[in-house]
């Protein structure tokens, strides 16, 4: 037995001895009021929880801007999600909206169905989202494009490394590709230094590199803002 385990066992025994009177009193009250205890034990009140996040309000120069935001509402293990993204670059604007229903399939993973609307297309798909080894957050989506008769993969990976109570190093990787059909593929990777504030918002700056199918790799400085609730 190591010294750390010995200290943990000693602390556990101390807490057990100090809580014996409280346990006896709790047992006495439970036995003396069986009807009330049974009624409270049988009560089940589902709790509704929700969240909202502006994950990215970002600029990459004078003509390249993007916004990513989303939220969800859920009861117990099931969530309804809604997210959107707008990207404006040199006069061209691309936007997409994704609606989904997902459910916990393990302590660290959710799976569900999604519907993405983009470029006058509605793409049905499947989503698998969760945390893998080394606390890498993965968001994997598969979509079926009926017009192009092809399967699309949209993969997002992020890793957060805390540097202090307010500073964080965020590394990311994104892949958009067709698993069948043409050889369309876009990849993006980079890092950001994020300074988070207690009021649930933060500022960040960093560098990202992007490689499209037949284009050379471009590197850009990024500055942005994020907010969560």
Image (tube, rainbow, N blue to C red):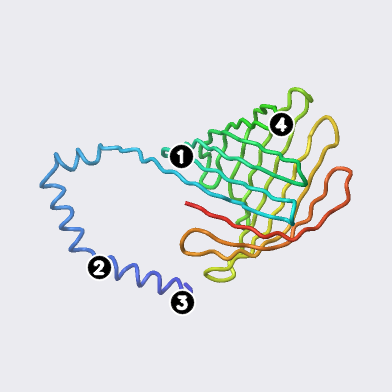
Bin the neighbour count of mark 4 within 10 Å (Cα to Cα): few under 14, some 14-19, many 20 and up: few
Front in this rendered view, residue 182 or 215: 215
Q: Whole-percent x and y of residue 130? A: 58, 46
**Residue 83 vertical position relative to residue 125 in the rendered view, above or below:** below
From the viewer's perspective, tell me whether residue 112 is left or right of residue 191: left
Bin the neighbour count of mark 1 within 10 Å (Cα to Cα): few under 14, some 14-19, many 20 and up: some
**Residue 95 vertical position relative to residue 210 in the rendered view, above or below:** above
**Residue 102 vertical position relative to residue 193 in the rendered view, above or below:** above
Compute the Cα span from label 2 to label 1: 43 Å
Compute the Cα span from label 3 to label 2: 21 Å
Q: Whole-percent x and y of residue 199? A: 46, 61
- The residue at which mark 2 appears reads as 17
Marks 4 and 1: which is nearer the front? 4
Q: Which residue is drawn at 58% across and 40% down?
A: 83
- The residue at which mark 1 appears reads as 73
Compute the Cα span from label 2 to label 4: 66 Å
From the viewer's perspective, tell me whether residue 215 is left or right of residue 74: right
From the viewer's perspective, tell me whether residue 91 is left or right of residue 225: right
Bin the neighbour count of mark 3 within 10 Å (Cα to Cα): few under 14, some 14-19, many 20 and up: few
Q: Earlier in the sequence, mark 1 or mark 3?
A: 3
Q: Which of marks 4 and 3 is nearer the N terminus?
A: 3
From the viewer's perspective, tell me whether residue 161 is left or right of residue 34: right
Secondary structure category for the residue under label 1: strand
Front in this rendered view, residue 88 or 112: 88
Q: Whole-percent x and y of residue 45? A: 31, 38
Residue 149, image quadrant:
top right
Q: Which of marks 2 and 4 is nearer the N terminus?
A: 2
CB atoms of marks 1 and 3 within 8 Å: no
Q: Earlier in the sequence, mark 4 or mark 1?
A: 1
Marks 1 and 3: which is nearer the front? 1
Residue 77, image quadrant:
top left
Q: Which mark is residue 3?
A: 3
């Amino acid at each position: 037995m190591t010294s750390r385990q010995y200290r943990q066992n000693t602390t556990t025994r101390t807490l057990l001895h100090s809580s014996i009177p409280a346990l006896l009193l709790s047992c006495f009250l439970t036995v003396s009021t069986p009807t009330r205890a049974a009624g409270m034990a049988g009560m089940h009140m589902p709790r509704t929880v929700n969240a909202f996040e502006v994950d990215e309000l970002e600029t990459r120069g004078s003509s390249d801007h993007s916004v990513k935001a989303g939220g969800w509402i859920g009861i117990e293990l099931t969530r309804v999600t809604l997210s959107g993204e707008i990207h404006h670059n040199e006069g061209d604007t691309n936007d997409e909206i994704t609606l989904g229903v997902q459910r916990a399939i393990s302590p660290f993973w959710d799976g569900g169905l999604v519907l993405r609307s983009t470029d006058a297309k509605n793409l049905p798909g499947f989503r698998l989202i969760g945390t893998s080894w080394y606390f890498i957050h993965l968001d994997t989506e598969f979509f079926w494009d009926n017009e192009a008769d092809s399967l699309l993969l949209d993969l997002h990976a992020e890793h957060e490394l805390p540097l202090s109570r307010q500073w964080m190093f965020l590394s990311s990787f994104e892949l958009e590709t067709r698993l069948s059909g043409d050889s369309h593929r876009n990849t993006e990777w980079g890092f950001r230094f994020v300074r988070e504030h207690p009021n649930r918002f933060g500022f960040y700056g960093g560098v990202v590199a992007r490689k499209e199918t037949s284009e050379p790799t471009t590197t850009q400085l990024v500055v942005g803002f994020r907010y969560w609730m």
